[in-house]
Image (cartoon, rainbow, N blue to C red):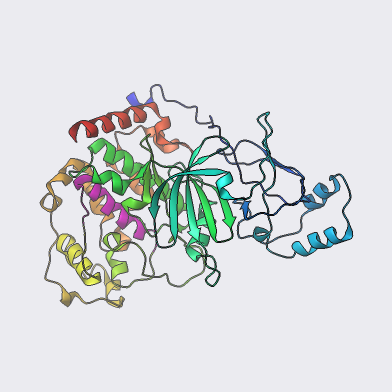
């Protein structure tokens, strides 16, 4: 009853932003209107003399797609003023037979805000100003950057390209999945910029990640904040699972946070579409600490339950401030840490386990399941959430709760019921009660640390 009062139903208000994901060629003069709520301004490509360019920007719609004939192309060509010589037409015809993503050159852009912005793109630095390096991985560097046109802060993920190796498959996978996922709890991919030696993803900027955030709170987070973070994680994950997409690399470092308390799934480089025909998946997925026992034992026939084990590990870590299963050596050591808390698996209740490549229970002492209060005293702050933690961390994957079912668990009973009716792109903090809860929880954490 209390939660139903003064609920802000204005979820249709869209925030102002500019899209730079214009597709264009010298012969093309078209107006494209983005359907994304983050890119409301139309981008018009103007006909200008050809110039030498080092980079190209292509929209998410066409990345990795090949050219297909369309009626609209001939319509646009007929509207062009001026005539083209035979050599120019021949060059254009030959270009049609090659992949689209290799041929788009950015040109002068006009934003439909009443102001003309002519922007010949030579280099990524003409559009974005790098502010600071946020992180670096094995094949990419991430920078906090500013859009020079509208001042928007973004995160540039620069993926290094090597001619002899080609485009990293993880980059292809991340781009192809993220362009299809539009959700308030999944990081937004705005644009993709292709330079000679790099592929640059333009993401929305997030203040920090859950891993860095937890480093500030050695005793774990406040119960209110744990609940809000967990619900957002489940909400984004349920959206992926409904579309047959497994994240496969859930860990605090891949959960991004902003100043509003919003949590978003990121780093889909290991994600996999379950609908893709494949008898088995690789078992070399998920950081060791967050890897479920079935995968550690060599199972490759996994499903959404893989991600839910990771959710359980993250939930426990938010409570205690430290990883639940911090293995230090190898797979055997990691399994030992799991079994020491959850007990040895029962072959009668999990008969499939004997067929796993690395199954050998003789390597471990006769562990029995521990009570959560004996694992870590801070877990008591979950109260009725302990039963939910137990459902996440079931040894048998078929016994783990789903993301959708978890959101209906009694642990979330004090959240407004209308939270389940929000459209995918609406933040849970569009509900005023939750916005107040988030600010209160943040204040409590700041006071106690």
Percent position of residue 398, x then y? 32, 62
Q: Main secondary structure of the magenta part?
A: helix
- Who's the residue at 67% across and 33% down the image? 112
Question: In this view of the protein, which residue sits in the foreground, 246 or 136?
Answer: 136
Q: Quadrant of residue 228?
A: top left
| Image quarter in which the N terminus is found | top left
Q: Is residue 217 magenta?
A: no
- Who's the residue at 32% across and 61% down the image? 287
Question: In this view of the protein, which residue sits in the foreground, 28 or 261?
Answer: 28
Q: Quadrant of residue 294?
A: bottom left
**Residue 243 shows in this picture:** no
Q: Is residue 263 above or below residue 277?
A: above
- Who's the residue at 28% across and 37% down the image? 225
Percent position of residue 274, x then y? 47, 62
Judged from this view, the residue extending furthest toward the front is 52
Q: Is residue 315 magenta?
A: yes
Left or right for 429, reference 150: left
Left or right for 367, reference 132: left
**Residue 286 shows in this picture:** yes
Left or right for 357, reference 131: left
Q: Is residue 398 above or below residue 119?
A: below
Q: Quadrant of residue 428?
A: top left
Percent position of residue 261, x then y? 35, 36
Question: In this view of the protein, which residue sits in the foreground, 356 or 143?
Answer: 143
- Who's the residue at 20% across and 63% down the image? 338
Percent position of residue 256, x then y? 38, 46
> Magenta residues, as a range?
303-324
Judged from this view, the residue extending furthest toward the top is 6
| Image quarter in which the C terminus is found | top left
């Amino acid at each position: 009853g209390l939660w139903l009062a003064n609920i802000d139903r204005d979820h249709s208000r869209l925030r102002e932003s500019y899209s730079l994901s214009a597709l264009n060629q010298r012969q093309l003069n078209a107006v494209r209107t983005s359907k994304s709520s983050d890119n409301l301004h139309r981008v018009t490509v103007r006909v200008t003399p050809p110039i030498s360019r080092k980079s190209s920007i292509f929209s998410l719609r066409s990345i990795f797609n090949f050219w297909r004939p369309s009626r609209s192309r001939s319509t646009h060509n007929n509207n062009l003023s001026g005539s083209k010589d035979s050599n120019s037409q021949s060059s254009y015809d030959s270009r049609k037979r090659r992949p689209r993503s290799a041929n788009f050159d950015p040109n002068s852009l006009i934003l439909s805000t009443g102001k003309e912005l002519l922007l010949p793109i030579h280099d990524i630095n003409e559009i974005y100003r790098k502010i600071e390096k946020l992180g670096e991985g094995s094949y990419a560097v991430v920078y906090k950057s500013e859009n020079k046109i509208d001042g928007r802060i973004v995160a540039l993920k620069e993926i290094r390209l090597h001619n002899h190796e080609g485009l990293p498959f993880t980059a292809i996978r991340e781009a192809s999945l993220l362009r299809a996922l539009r959700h308030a709890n999944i990081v937004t991919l705005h644009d993709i910029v292709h330079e000679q030696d790099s592929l640059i993803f333009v993401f929305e900027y997030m203040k920090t990640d859950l891993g860095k955030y937890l480093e500030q709170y050695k005793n774990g987070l406040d119960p209110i904040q744990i609940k809000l973070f967990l619900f957002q994680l489940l909400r984004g994950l349920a959206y992926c699972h409904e579309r047959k997409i497994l994240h496969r690399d859930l860990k605090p470092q891949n959960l991004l946070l902003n100043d509003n308390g919003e949590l978003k799934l990121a780093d889909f480089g290991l994600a996999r579409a379950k609908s893709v025909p494949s008898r088995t998946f690789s078992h070399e997925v998920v950081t060791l600490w967050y890897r479920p026992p079935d995968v550690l034992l060599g199972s490759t026939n996994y499903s959404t339950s893989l991600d839910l084990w990771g959710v359980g590990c993250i939930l426990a870590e938010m409570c205690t401030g430290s990883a639940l299963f911090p293995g230090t050596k190898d797979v055997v050591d990691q399994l030992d840490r799991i079994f020491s808390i959850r007990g040895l698996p029962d072959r009668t209740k999990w008969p499939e386990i004997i067929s796993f490549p690395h199954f050998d229970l003789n390597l471990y002492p006769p562990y029995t399941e521990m009570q959560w209060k004996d694992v870590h005293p801070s877990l008591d702050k979950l109260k009725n959430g302990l039963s939910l933690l137990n459902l996440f961390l079931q040894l048998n994957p078929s016994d783990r709760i789903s993301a959708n079912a978890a959101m209906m668990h009694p642990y979330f009973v004090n959240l407004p019921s209308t939270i389940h009716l929000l459209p995918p792109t609406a933040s849970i903090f569009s509900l005023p009660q939750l916005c107040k809860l988030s600010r209160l929880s943040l204040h409590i954490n700041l006071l106690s640390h």
